[in-house]
Image: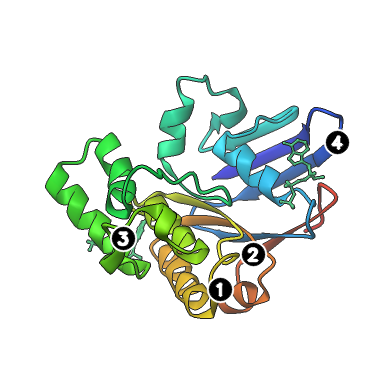
Amino acid sequence: MITFSQVTKRYPGGHEALCEASFTIATGEMVAVTGPSGAGKSTLLKLIAGIERPTSGSVLVDGQNIGRLSRKAMPYWRRTLGLVFQDAKLLYDRNCFENVMLPLRISGMPVKEAARRARAALDKVGLKDRERAMPITLSGGEQQRLAIARAIVNRPSILLADEPTGNLDADYAELLLDMLAAFSRAGVTLVIATHEPRLIERLKPRVLALRGGRVLT
Ligand code: ADP
Ligand code: ADP
């Protein structure tokens, strides 16, 4: 369970990106975070991921205070999450297969099982025949799909996605919606920042609407 209690995030310069936000997301729930550009959607996701820390208030995930995690604990926390963010941070000196393998190898999975899983994840996003390609040679949409494969290969129990359909053409956006629906059925907690109407229509998530850093619903 994810609990925001009176969370305010003020960036240097004084701008309040999030203002006294309080809400709860149950385990296994699917939530679409909506709102115009600048509403605070990315900030909300970053607070869950521990990429940003609240200025005041608390972000608890299964009782763990994410804003208070030590620098040392943070990488372990991140590894339990699936993160699909705009700046995908792919490893550009490794090929697609290696990019997707890495999270599994870091978590100690034997090579053979990791390779099988990495191929299954690449297959799922339609990149199976590009596994030896370097990320730099991929289109923006393909890089996005690679980032998605890497985010889901560990089977995270929480998936955080920031505009995941943003760079995808229509066919792959549909595929992604199917994937998100499958994760949800499998019990994954999904928090998706989006202003894609089809995602809302198709997946019928709970909608958390933000305006100017305030939670409306
Ligand atoms: P959204 O994802 O809804 O577009 P963001 O969470 O990215 O909104 O941003 C919310 C507000 O916080 C915006 O006014 C944005 O300019 C500001 N903001 C976001 N990140 C930073 C940052 N690192 N430093 C300063 N201001 C920021
Ligand atoms: P396998 O590795 O056994 O071939 P897959 O990796 O293809 O299996 O995933 C099997 C099913 O599990 C798929 O329907 C997929 O959508 C779903 N799945 C993916 N990620 C997760 C997750 N984090 N938790 C639970 N199920 C997941």
Q: Tell me the quarter of the picture where residue 178 sits.
A: bottom left
Q: Kindly state the secondary structure of the residue where label 1 is placed.
A: helix
Dot 3 or dot 2, earlier in sequence:
3
- Mark 4 vs mark 1: in front: 4
Distance from label 4 to label 1 (Cα)?
Answer: 33 Å
Dot 4 or dot 3, earlier in sequence:
4
Distance from label 4 to label 3 (Cα)?
Answer: 39 Å
Q: Which residue is mark 2?
A: 206
Give the crowd class for mark 1: few <14, some 14-19, many >=20 residues within 10 Å.
some
Where ligand 2 lies, by quadrant?
A: bottom left
Is ligand 1 within 8 Å of the beta carbon of the residue shown at mark 4? yes
Please name the amino acid that badge 1 sits on.
Leu
Does the rendering let one see residue 146?
A: no
Q: Residue at x 26, y 57 (%)?
A: 132
Distance from label 1 to label 3 (Cα)?
Answer: 21 Å
Give the crowd class for mark 3: few <14, some 14-19, many >=20 residues within 10 Å.
many
Residue 145: percent from the left, percent from the top? 44, 62
Disc sitting over residue 67 in the figure: none
Please name the amino acid that badge 3 sits on.
Ala
Q: Residue at x 36, y 42 (%)?
A: 93
Disc sitting over residue 203 in the figure: 1
- Give whichever of 215, 37 is nearer the camera: 37
Q: Kindly state the secondary structure of the residue where label 2 is placed.
A: strand
Residue 168: percent from the left, percent from the top? 53, 69
Disc sitting over residue 15 in the figure: 4
Disc sitting over residue 121 in the figure: 3
Distance from label 3 to label 2 (Cα)?
Answer: 27 Å
